[in-house]
Structure formats: C-alpha cells, structure tokens
Image (tube, grey):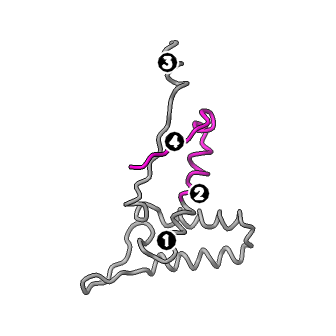
Amino acid sequence: EENRIMLEQSARYVCTLDVVALYPSIPKEQALLAVDHALSLAGIGDAKKTFVVSLIRFSFNNSVIHYRGNWYSSMKGIPTGGPDSGSIANIFVKWLFRTHLLLSPDCIRHNLAICRKR
C-alpha cells in the first residue's frame, strides 16, 4: 500500500507533439474552435469573430497544391504551407494546452505538464 502511494505521488505525465505531422493532425473544426476562443479572449465582437472563422473555414476547404501536373487538396487536418496555417497551428496548440492539458484535473493535482521533442 505504501509503495503504491509513493508511486502515485511521483507520477509524471508526458505530452508529445509531432512537429512533422502537426498540420495534418490538427482537426479543422477543433482549429476553428481554438481561433474562436482566441478571438473571444482578445475581445473581438461576435460579428467579426464569425467573419474571421468563416474566412478560415473557406481557406481550409478551398486550399489546393499543384504537384507534377496534378492538383491536390488536404483530406486531413489543416493545409500544410497555407499562409494562415502557421498562426492557426500556434493558436491551436496553445488552446489545446489550456483546455485539455494544463487545466485537466491530473495536471492541476500534480501541478505539472511535461513536454518533450520527438
């Protein structure tokens, strides 16, 4: 019993992000929620938020690349190399940490969040 308590007290949680596959692994709708949340925190009004989010959704749904004579669109995640993708990925990761990792009961109870490069 005493060993189990010691183990629970010293438990660590590891969070990883795969930078190579970051963009394809970000769900589009979750990214839009993250942007909406960030705009709310910045005090942007509902009309402007709706407009910005709809522009980003349009960008997600209509981005294509041309490779060796063929056109391709993203099937999964946010477009890699899109002009707004880097900023949206940063907003998403910050939102993910705030809403799912740093504020989870386990992280609050243990007062930690450990991340490492892959």
Q: Which residue lies furthest to the front in this view?
A: 117
Q: Position of residue 21 (x, y in %)?
A: 38, 60
Secondary element at tag 2 = helix
The residue nearer to you, when weighing 20 against 104, is 20
Q: Is residue 58 magenta?
A: no
Using the image, determine if residue 10 lies above or below residue 88.
above
Secondary element at tag 1 = helix
- Within 10 Å of the Cα at label 1, are there few (<14), some (14-19), or many (20+) other Cα atoms? some
Inter-mark Cα distance, 1 to 2: 15 Å
Q: Quickly name the residue at label 3.
A: 4
Secondary element at tag 4 = strand
Secondary element at tag 3 = helix
Inter-mark Cα distance, 4 to 2: 16 Å
Residue at position x 45%, y 81% from top?
A: 62
Q: Where is residue 13 in the image (x, y as percent from the top left)?
A: 49, 37
| Mark 2 residue type | Trp
Residue at position x 53%, y 75% from top?
A: 57
Task: Tell me, for residue 95, which label it has, or none.
Answer: 2
| Mark 1 residue type | Ser
| Mark 3 residue type | Arg
Q: Which residue lies furthest to the bottom in this view?
A: 69
| For discs 1 and 4, the disc positioned in front in the rendered view | 4
Residue at position x 43%, y 72% from top?
A: 79
Q: Position of residue 105 (x, y in %)?
A: 61, 38
Residues at marks 4 and 2 touching, judged by CB atoms closer than 8 Å: no
| For discs 3 and 4, the disc positioned in front in the rendered view | 4
Q: Give the range drawn in magenta.
A: 93-118
Using the image, determine if residue 22 lies above or below residue 81.
above
Mark closer to the chain start, 3 or 4: 3
